[in-house]
């Protein structure tokens, strides 16, 4: 334990966007403040094994892979039952069209609420207990859905599964494990894998429900998530620096018989006040930060486009090109290839671009944003190709290529925005991401409902062109935030 002179004041929590350079670089210790203040507990330098940033690279990537794989299973579960909906309704003797929609979209409604609860709780009590509690409940609710004996039970348990899906905490864990110079690659992995789920979920669900019955779509999710969570229970440890330092401060007080030790980050408030502040934090980001608000809105719109394509592509290929049900399911591979290409682009560009733009100076979160221009132009390009080639009856491979472009743009947009928000609001990355996820899942639940009437009235050509023009309206966004983002973050600091 080291001590250094430091003038005045008790340890204060850093405002969002202002990361402690010691925490970012893994160089912390214990600081003795003035005689009227408390001693500040910190990490003990680069070799402190308690600091997740100092864990070995293979260990950090292994944990990231496990967390990302769990996120993939959870996003797959969002739509894996979609092909089985007719079976479920027939089994329970229902012909209610609203029930068929609710069976899929109720998950998204739960996901709107879940991040607003889970993200701040992970910043209050630490990632570990919130993650494990949510994942275990996810397994329980998945099994309960498979065993349901009424349609209402299926809908209710899917809603609960949406609430407890801790996908938002994965971004927080990624922020905890990786420094800025390697965070772009890490966020690419964390951001790409959840996009695989909704893309291939319908295909997987179609094969499972056809061969094993609808209950096995939920058994599959429950068994897969239980397997990954078992590994995480063994290997995952607390990654949130604030929680680790609070635990360390309590341990040092016991060992040294002192009552004046406090962690370098964190507020010294009553638990009830801390809980309330944590719960409202994502809403504060969403309502009072123009950066979080606009980035979340754009990401929500692009994510909604994904669901419009996913919910209409099978019908398009069957009605226009005469595909069978299984062949139509395989056509989602085009979107999957696009997602992979977008991820490769982010993996190569995000960290390298920061190094080039910093030019020997300090890296800024805004250095991530030029990559977003790729997504800005590729998404509408894909929509134009997909829409007009379907409208004109061009060979089926061309609209599939169009969905590939959409996949590239979706991945680049999602990964870049999330990496930017994590860099800008590191200590409260989970809350900032949660604010964006609210828009994302609202859009994912509502926009697909607009797809059929949009295409019925405008056709696939002008219908998708309209979506493309809306996406083009956001082209100036990364340019504005690249030049003015730092000033906006300073002006609109969120009291957390």
Image (cartoon, rainbow, N blue to C red):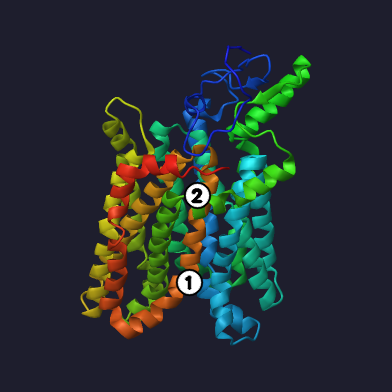
Mark 1 and 2 residues: CB-CB less than 8 Å, in contact? no
Residue denoted by label 2: 433
**Residue at (30, 46) in percent of width and height:** 371
Query: Judging from the image, what secondary structure is the residue with disc 1 in?
Result: helix
Bin the neighbour count of mark 1 within 10 Å (Cα to Cα): few under 14, some 14-19, many 20 and up.
Answer: some
Q: Which corner quadrant holds the C terminus?
A: top right
Q: Which of 16 and 378 is in front in this view?
A: 16
Left or right: 375 as drawn, with respect to 440: left
**Residue at (39, 76) in percent of width and height:** 451
**Residue at (38, 40) in percent of width and height:** 487
Left or right: 60 as drawn, with respect to 214: left
The numbered dot on residue 446 is: 1
Q: Which of 288 and 167 is in front in this view?
A: 288
Residue 468 vertical position relative to residue 86 in the rendered view, above or below: above
Query: Judging from the image, what secondary structure is the residue with disc 2 in?
Result: helix
Figure quadrant of residue 185:
top left
Bin the neighbour count of mark 2 within 10 Å (Cα to Cα): few under 14, some 14-19, many 20 and up.
Answer: many
Q: Can residue 70 be seen at all in this image of the molecule?
A: no
């Amino acid at each position: 334990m080291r001590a250094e002179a430091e003038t005045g004041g008790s340890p204060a929590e850093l405002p969002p966007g202002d990361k402690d350079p010691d925490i970012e670089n893994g160089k912390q210790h214990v600081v003795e403040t003035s005689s009227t203040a408390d001693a500040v507990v910190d990490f003990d330098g680069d070799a402190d094994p308690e600091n997740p940033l100092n864990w070995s690279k293979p260990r950090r990537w292994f944990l990231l892979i496990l967390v990302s794989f769990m996120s993939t299973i959870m996003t797959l579960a969002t739509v894996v039952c979609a092909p089985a909906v007719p079976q479920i309704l027939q089994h329970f003797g229902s012909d209610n069209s609203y029930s068929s929609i609710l069976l899929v979209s109720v998950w998204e409604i739960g996901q709107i609420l879940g991040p607003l609860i889970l993200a701040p709780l992970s910043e209050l009590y630490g990632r570990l207990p919130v993650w494990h509690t949510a994942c275990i409940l996810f397994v329980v609710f998945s099994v309960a859905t498979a065993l349901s004996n009424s349609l209402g039970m299926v809908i209710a348990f899917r809603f609960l599964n949406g609430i407890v899906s801790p996908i938002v905490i994965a971004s927080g864990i990624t922020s905890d494990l990786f420094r800025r110079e390697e965070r772009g690659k890490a966020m690419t992995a964390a951001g790409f894998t959840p996009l695989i789920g909704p893309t291939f979920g319908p295909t997987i669900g179609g094969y499972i429900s056809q061969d094993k019955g609808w209950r096995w779509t939920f058994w599959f999710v429950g068994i897969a998530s239980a397997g990954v969570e078992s590994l995480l229970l063994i290997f995952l440890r607390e990654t949130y620096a604030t929680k680790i330092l609070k635990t360390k401060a309590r341990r040092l007080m016991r060992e040294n018989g002192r009552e004046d030790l406090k962690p370098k980050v964190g507020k010294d408030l009553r638990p009830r006040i801390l809980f309330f502040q944590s719960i409202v934090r994502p809403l504060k980001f969403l309502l009072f930060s123009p950066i979080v608000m606009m980035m979340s809105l754009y990401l929500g719109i692009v994510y909604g486009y994904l669901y419009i394509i996913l919910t209409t592509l099978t019908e398009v290929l069957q009605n226009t090109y005469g595909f069978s049900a299984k062949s139509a399911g395989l056509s989602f591979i085009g979107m999957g290839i696009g997602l992979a290409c977008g991820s490769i682009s982010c993996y190569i560009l995000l960290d390298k671009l920061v190094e080039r733009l910093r030019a020997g100076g300090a890296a800024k979160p805004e250095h991530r944003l030029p990559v977003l221009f790729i997504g800005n132009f590729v998404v509408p390009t894909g929509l134009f190709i997909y829409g007009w080639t379907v409208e004109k009856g061009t060979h089926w491979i061309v609209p599939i290529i169009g969905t590939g472009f959409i996949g590239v743009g979706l991945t680049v947009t999602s990964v870049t925005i999330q990496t930017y928000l994590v860099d800008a609001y590191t200590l409260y990355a989970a809350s900032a991401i949660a604010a964006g996820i609210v828009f994302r899942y609202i859009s994912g639940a509502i926009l697909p409902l607009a797809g059929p009437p949009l295409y019925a009235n405008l056709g696939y050509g002008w219908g998708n062109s309209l979506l493309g023009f809306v996406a083009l309206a956001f082209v100036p966004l990364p340019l504005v935030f690249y030049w003015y983002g730092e000033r906006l973050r300073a002006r609109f600091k969120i009291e957390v």
